[in-house]
Image (cartoon, rainbow, N blue to C red):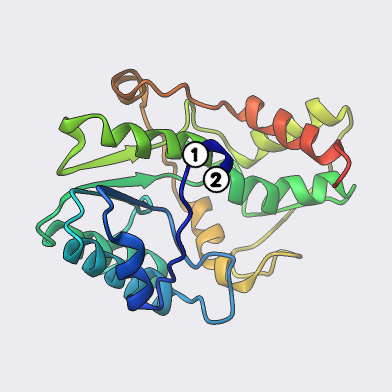
């Protein structure tokens, strides 16, 4: 980022003083921070709840003009799942902050879920474990596409005060993801299924409830209007898997 002309500053969501310094002189804030996959002191309570509250307070005090918050699809202050509850509470705080705001609610991130559920086992030559039948379809979205929407929101005044629901170009099932890896790897991938509530090898316990819930509903999203309005070229499942497999074959270092 520095080589591209950015000026790095240090801020910790758990340290309000550092956030005040980081927000000083800033016109807009885009935050994607969350506790998923972090561990240690970075928890839902310290990052997704209190940490985001600290950042909103610091941005407001610094006179930030536009605050873009990357939330999650289904976020609700009354949600029984702590992660989605904290995201919903942050949305509430932001709407009443007095700042111009935009909230992005992305569907499942390809970059998080596909490597964890299918990519890792497939590259290791191991079977993929799915909860339930694995045929529910979700409009998974690439992180880079969500980043593009977040940046574009700063240049589109109509995005202020809006919730943008973000998904990929087409809904896909876990079996479709497996098929995409089979195509790029040139071999079959074994698939085994387990009942809801059973563990999936290699996955952290914290994501198991959400992974199990994905087999109970579909989440298709029509993105045609939004991609045109914000000029975002959506990443397809094939694009993502091809890039993931190619990157896995590149030498490290």
Q: Is residue 198 left or right of residue 28?
A: right
Pinpoint residue 44: horizontal percent, then vertical percent: 43, 74
Name the residue that disc number 1 marks: 5
- 10 Å crowding of disc 2: few (<14), some (14-19), many (20+): few
Residue at 33 percent of width and 31 percent of height: 152
In three-dimensional space, the C-alpha distance between marks 2 and 1, rounded to whole angstroms, equals: 5 Å
Residue at the extreme bottom of the image, as rendered: 41
Looking at the rendering, which quadrant does residue 74 occupy?
bottom left
Image check: 81 left or right of 143? left
To which residue does mark 2 refer? 2
* Residue 77 visible in the picture: no
Q: Nearer the viewer, residue 55 or 172?
A: 55
Task: Locate residue 71: give its quadrant.
Answer: bottom left
Residue 72 placement (x, y as % from top left): 38, 53
Q: Contact, CB < 8 Å: mark 2 with mark 1?
A: yes
Q: Secondary structure at mark 1?
A: loop
């Amino acid at each position: 980022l520095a080589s591209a002309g950015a000026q790095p500053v240090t801020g910790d969501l758990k340290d309000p003083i550092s956030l005040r310094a980081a927000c000083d002189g800033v016109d807009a804030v885009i935050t994607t921070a969350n506790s998923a996959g972090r561990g240690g002191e970075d928890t839902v309570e310290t990052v997704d709840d209190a940490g985001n509250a600290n950042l909103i307070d610091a941005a407001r005090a610094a006179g930030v003009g536009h605050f873009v918050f990357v939330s999650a699809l289904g976020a609700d202050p009354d949600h029984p799942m702590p992660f989605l509850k904290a995201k919903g509470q942050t949305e509430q705080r932001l709407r009443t902050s007095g700042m111009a705001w935009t909230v992005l609610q992305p569907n499942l991130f390809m970059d998080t879920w596909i490597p964890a559920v299918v990519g890792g086992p497939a590259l290791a030559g191991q079977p993929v474990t799915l909860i339930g039948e694995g045929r529910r379809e979700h409009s998974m979205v690439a992180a880079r596409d969500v980043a593009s929407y977040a940046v574009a929101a700063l240049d589109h005044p109509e995005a202020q005060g809006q919730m943008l629901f973000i998904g990929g170009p087409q809904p896909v099932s876990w079996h479709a993801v497996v098929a995409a890896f089979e195509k790029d790897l040139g071999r079959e991938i074994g698939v085994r299924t387990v009942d809801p509530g059973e563990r999936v090898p290699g996955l952290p316990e914290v994501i198991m409830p959400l992974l199990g819930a994905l087999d109970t509903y579909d989440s298709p999203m029509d993105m045609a209007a939004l991609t045109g309005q914000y000029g975002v070229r959506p990443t397809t499942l094939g694009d993502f898997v091809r890039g993931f497999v190619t990157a896995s074959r590149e030498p490290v270092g």
